[in-house]
Image (cartoon, grey):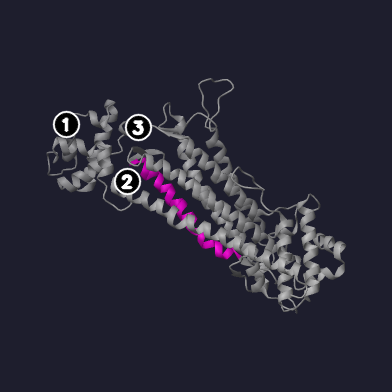
Amino acid sequence: MIKDSGRATAPDAFHWLVEMNKASAVMLVERGLLPPALGRTIAEAIAQVAVRGEAGGERPGDYLEFEKAMVALAGPDVSRVHIGRSRQDLGATLQRLALRRDYLHVFTRLIETRAALLDLASRHPHDVVPAYTWGVQAQPLTLGHYLLGFLSAFARLAERMREAYPRINRSPFGTAAMGTSSFDIDRMRLAELLGFDGLIENSFDAGQIAPIDLGAELAGLATSCGLTIGALVADLTAQYAQPHPWLLLASGAQTGGSSIMPQKRNPLGLTFLRGRASRLIGSAQSFTLVAHNVATGMGDYKPFIDPEQGNQPQATIELMALVLDSLGEVVRALHFDAVRAKQEVDQEFSTMTELADVLQRDGDIPFRIGHHFAARLVEHLRAQGQRASEIAFSEAQRLWREVADELDFPVGALPLSESMFRRALDADNMVQSSKGMGGPQAVEVNRMLAAARNDLLDIDRPWQKARIADLARAEEALNKRFETLLAHSDD
């Protein structure tokens, strides 16, 4: 199990066997399948095994070993708690009990990581930064707008996780090996006692098919998370090829020195994060490969049957939590240099799209003609070693006439004033002139920041707290009913 400073050690298989046996004992007595006196004997045996396990004794994760411990305490009659059950449905149920807890933990880490990104975006919402396509500077954006792109991706991940949870939190308990049994087991009561939202109804599906698509759904979520993080890490890592990055890790826990080159500040946090994100994707794909082309009923995709094999879906979810934690630490260590970012934009020609747009909108010039002129302007500036802001307006007019002659275009004079021309080449102007919904202009960035904040505060945090509260209430109700079973032999 992955451990971190914000989370206690996760319950093991023994813990969940205790909980499932509690639920079975309660349901069987309520259903009249066990007499109350035997139900109390069974409850006492379960409680004693649990106490011994908590006190440092044996904590068997296999049901047959758990049952031996109960029989040793109270005799063979206590094995009647196993009526209508199998290690198949016990294992499938155990997996979901453990997974949903880790799943909600991952959701918590996702919320906190998004909060860190939102904080950084809120501190620099309108500072201009370069954005790239094909690895080449393309257009200016703002840091707020850029980070909101990743926040949008993580919001979609959160939405998919909320949607998936009701499917994860369905009970296979009481289906026995695959065809239920001749005992009148109340599966809905078992589900209620263990805090499930409902049943995987078909008993064959519950233990033999559902584990496949459960793992596949979790693998998809983990893959989406890993790919989004990988894209951000790649962008940040590219900064370190520059002599003076505009977005880098502050010196500290996320950086490290060289054993030979004293000037280096290696981005260890980014390197480790990239490796963890890659392992996350690999772990997700591992389940898919293991479960591929396997007949139903086999154990390949049901690793809970073999403790040495490990639980691949659960391991993937635990790794996802670690990756999100690592991302949060990296984001909180990022230092943004707004002046350097603007210099990077000004050293390139990423405002030329706006020049072509201004020529079309204000000068009534067809876009392709304006595009051709802007491209010629860039060729000239590069040849002269100049920035866009350094060209003489008269030189721009000359280049326009040259392009118009080449293309046999009738407008022989550049149809922009010098102020219009200069404004079109300014990165801040280009960003703030954007009109489309979701663009980098201040009004839209402010709106999207508020929406992202509302997603966290009004949707995701309440959802997470409600699900944790649901499980806590179910656990409390099971314990109360179990205590009643212990206390009253005639109940």
Residue 144 inside the magenta-drawn segment: yes
Q: Quadrant of the C terminus?
A: bottom right
**At numbered mark 2, what does the secondary structure look like: helix, strand or loop?**
loop
Residue 100: quarter of image: bottom right
Pair 1/2: label in front: 2
Q: Nearer the viewer, residue 80 or 435?
A: 80
Q: Where residue 72 sits: x, y (%)?
A: 87, 62
Is residue 365 in view from this perspective? no
Q: Is residue 257 left or right of residue 341?
A: right
Residue type pointed to by label 1: Phe
| Mark 3 / mark 1, whichever is N-terminal | 3
Q: Where residue 123 sits: x, y (%)?
A: 38, 39
| Mark 2 / mark 3, whichever is N-terminal | 3
Q: Where residue 332 sits: x, y (%)?
A: 48, 38
Residue type pointed to by label 2: Pro
| Mark 1 / mark 2, whichever is N-terminal | 1
Q: Where residue 402 sits: x, y (%)?
A: 17, 35
Is residue 126 in view from this perspective? yes
The residue pinned by badge 2 equals: 440
Rendered residue at 78%/51% (across/down): 55
Q: Is residue 255 left or right of residue 45?
A: left
Distance CA(mark 2)–CA(mark 3)? 18 Å
The residue pinned by badge 3 equals: 344
**At numbered mark 3, what does the secondary structure look like: helix, strand or loop?**
helix
Q: In this view, does 202 lie to the left or right of 430?
A: right
The answer to the question of whether label 2 and label 3 lie on touching residues, with beta carbons closer than 8 A, is no
**At numbered mark 1, what does the secondary structure look like: helix, strand or loop?**
helix
Residue type pointed to by label 3: Glu
Rendered view: 28 above or below 242: below
User: What span is in magenta?
Assistant: 141-169
